[in-house]
Image (tube, rainbow, N blue to C red):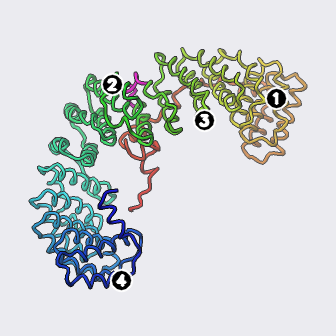
Amino acid sequence: MSGQGGQDAKFFQRGKIQEFRAELEAAETKDKKFTKRKTVLKKIVANITMGNDMSPLFTDVVQCLGTPLLEIKKMVYLFLVCYGRQKADQLHLVIESFLQDCNDRNPLVRALAIRTMSYIPTPVVIEALTDQLRHCLRDRDPYVRKTAAICVAKLYAADPRKAEKGGFVEMLRDLLLDSNATVVANAVAALSEIGDRQDGVIFKLNLTVANKLLTALGESSEWGTIYILDSLLRYVPEKHEDAEMIAERVIVQLNHANSAVVLTAIKILLYLMNYMDNRKLMEYICRKMGPPLGEFSFLSPCEVQSSHIIIVTLLSSGPEVQYVALRNILLIIQRRPAVLKNDVKVFFCKYNDPIYVKLAKLEIMYRLAREENAREVLAELQEYASEVDIDFVRKAVRSIGRLAIKVQPAADACIQALLDLIDTKVSYVVQEAVIVIKDVFRRYPGKYEGIIPTLCQHLDLLDEPESKAAMIWIIGQFANRIDNADELMDDLTYTFLEEPTEVQLALLTAAVKLFIYKPHSDTTKALVHKVLKWTTEEVDNPDLRDRGFMYWRMLAINPTVAGEIVLAEKPAITTDADRMDRGALDQLLLHTGTLGSIYHKNPEVCCVDYSA
């Protein structure tokens, strides 16, 4: 804690209104340097911070506005921001002081006054604010102009008609061409806030203004840079050359030290690439985006230096920033796979990564997997399958199966890896392996059915609905290749009525398949009759009961047709289902760096606007 902070800590003690009022009255005499008044106001502000109601002191505090000391004015204005709406009937006491301060010599006082007025959106204050705000937007000092720009957004929120009729929106647009970068950034922020309102004025850019905003980037703060970059989404290039020119000027922001600036720059580049025609430039942009995306603390400093990747502060980012980056990267590589196609190693998990970071990396590893790097990815996944975190192990085992489905040349190695994991006889590992192997059978029909006996040997380890249903599907689908399929089904149906609906549906369909494969077996006949009777007479679930009636009638009318329907060739599993819809993906990429890009849902769905 700094020395000043240590001194101010003594003010954070609960005080009484009467005591503070007496101290303020006493401070009016023999207080030439305003030390007593300053001390009392610090106590009052501290009590406001602690949640104590200081509004009864309104008239006493506002009398301090005439004090020429800036520090005292700041505290009085803070008090007014807190209680101005609550004491709207007494605000006429401070209007004259507001107007005097708006014309003060000191630009800090002018800015403080106009900002405080904008925070108190009552009719009497807004009426006094409009004329002063117009003067402040043209003030000679950039600090006052940049403060006034934000005040326009607040005025618009309080009274949109007054803001539009008063020409304040047009004055904000004029500030986009201001010579000061901070003023430009604040004007952009205010126009963006107004444009995002349902009743707001649409904020669009043309090429001239866009170029002016890009010029201001070099002198803007990080906050201003993000606002200016974000505003470029409001510019629709009319020519390919315009989009390419703007992209070339934005690329330099990929070297920025701030992760939010980097993500925003990437968002703009992805947006502009939709309007480009120059394939070489697009490939160059993808290569340039690769290093910053790989810099969110995934590589050690030595690896970074050896790879000649730009060293930025993102290398020391915490896991929370990593997670935000990973979720955004997951969207980006689906739309532009070339961005990180050679950098899968960057996403290998570290032993000390939090589980949410590990799971996000696993998904990206799968997305980046291809024939050239499948062996490395598989070896890494096998390592993860021996970890202690159960959720992580489950995800790793399932990723091995997904890798087999996605990369055909790696399927044999993936199946062998899954068999090795099954041999460990660890319950949750075996169950995840069975689940993904069912999908592998559908992806490569007639190729890996030889491992079914191995799966049947571990039937006793399956106690979760999804894995149990997967194994039952395998037994029913390949009942003609399993010698003791009827015995296995008889054991599995023993607890039919106690099983979850998911397992009951699987047992019903498997029993029918078994009967179709072995229609002359007495055991099979008894089994299917028993299951159908349970399903139609003792089960409450309507889906299960209706399916039971359907199967029963099909078998009774024409067993041959029933076999053609139940055993019809199923479409092979593909990785297309893993891909997000192109339109939804493009929409999410426009919200890179926001909550929408983390939840992978449009902000309209995942975020509630409490300001409405």
Instruction: Name the front one of labels 1 and 2.
Output: 2
Name the residue that disc number 3 marks: 389
Q: Does the image show residue 476?
A: yes
Of the numbered discs 4 and 1, the one sitting upstream in the chain is: 4
In which image quadrant can residue 536 be found?
top right
C-alpha gap between disc 1 and disc 2: 60 Å
Name the residue that disc number 2 marks: 305
Are circles 4 and 1 on residues that touch, CB within 8 Å?
no
Name the residue that disc number 4 marks: 19
C-alpha gap between disc 2 and disc 3: 32 Å
- Which secondary structure, mark 1? helix
Nearer to the camera, 106 or 583: 106
Quadrant into which the C terminus falls: bottom left
Give the magenta range: 335-344
Name the residue that disc number 1 marks: 489
Of the numbered discs 3 and 4, the one sitting upstream in the chain is: 4
Q: Image point 23% across, 47% down: which residue?
A: 221
Are circles 2 and 3 on residues that touch, CB within 8 Å?
no
Of the numbered discs 1 and 3, the one sitting upstream in the chain is: 3
Of the numbered discs 2 and 4, the one sitting upstream in the chain is: 4
Q: Residues within 10 Å of mark 3 (few under 14, many from 20)?
A: few
In which image quadrant can residue 38 be found?
bottom left
Of the numbered discs 2 and 3, the one sitting upstream in the chain is: 2
Residue 81 placed where, x, y %? 30, 70
C-alpha gap between disc 3 and disc 4: 59 Å
Q: Amino acid at mark 1?
A: Met
C-alpha gap between disc 4 and disc 1: 84 Å
- Which secondary structure, mark 3? loop
Q: Amino acid at mark 4?
A: Glu
Residue 254 placed where, x, y %? 28, 34
